[in-house]
């Protein structure tokens, strides 16, 4: 999962396939997939940064 989260564009395209079925429109699914993929990637990056900051505070 970490490898997939580090590549938001690949995650977005993978998310767009099931969203295409849900929305029945690939353009909308691609836009939502892009937004969701980059949001997940950003949240993961912030989580990693916060963990590193907490480790530095403990030292």
Image (tube, rainbow, N blue to C red):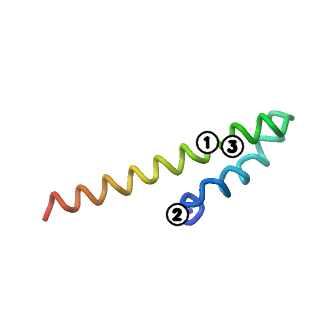
* Residue 44 disc label: none
Q: In this view, does 33 lie above or below 7?
A: above
Q: Name the residue under label 2.
A: 2
Q: Residue at x 54, y 60 (%)?
A: 6
Label 1 crowd bin: few (<14), some (14–19), many (20+), radius 10 Å: some
Q: Residue extending furthest right?
A: 24
Q: Is label 3 in contact with label 1 (beta carbons under 8 Å)?
A: yes
- Please tell me whether residue 50 is drawn above or below residue 19 in the rendered image: below
The reply to whether the C-beta atoms of the residues labelled 3 and 2 are less than 8 Å apart is no
Look at discs 3 and 2 and give the one toward the viewer: 3
Q: Residue furthest left?
A: 59
* Mark closer to the chain start, 2 or 1: 2
Rounded to the nearest angstrom, the CA distance separating label 2 from label 1 is 16 Å
Q: In which quarter of the image is residue 35?
A: top right
Q: How far apart are marks 3 and 1 (CA)?
A: 5 Å
Is 51 positioned to the left or the right of 19 in the image? Answer: left
- Callout 2 secondary element: helix
Q: Which element is circle 3 on? A: helix
Q: Residue at x 46, y 52 (%)?
A: 44
x, y (%) of residue 54?
23, 56
Q: In this view, does 39 lie to the left or right of 23?
A: left
49 to 43, vertically: above or below: below
Q: Where is residue 12 in the image (x, y as percent from the top left)?
A: 68, 50
Q: Name the residue under label 1.
A: 36
How many numbered tags mark residues here? Answer: 3
Residue 29's x, y, as percent? 76, 39
21 left or right of 56 in image: right
Q: Earlier in the sequence, mark 3 or mark 2?
A: 2
Q: Which residue in the structure is indicated by mark 3?
A: 33
Quadrant of the drawing holding the N terminus: bottom right
Q: Residue at x 83, y 40 (%)?
A: 26
């Amino acid at each position: 999962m970490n490898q997939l989260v580090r590549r938001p564009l690949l995650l977005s395209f993978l998310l767009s396939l099931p969203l295409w079925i849900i929305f029945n429109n690939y353009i909308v699914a691609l836009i939502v997939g892009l937004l969701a993929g980059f949001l997940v990637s950003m949240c993961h990056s912030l989580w990693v940064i916060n963990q590193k900051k907490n480790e530095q505070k403990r030292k």
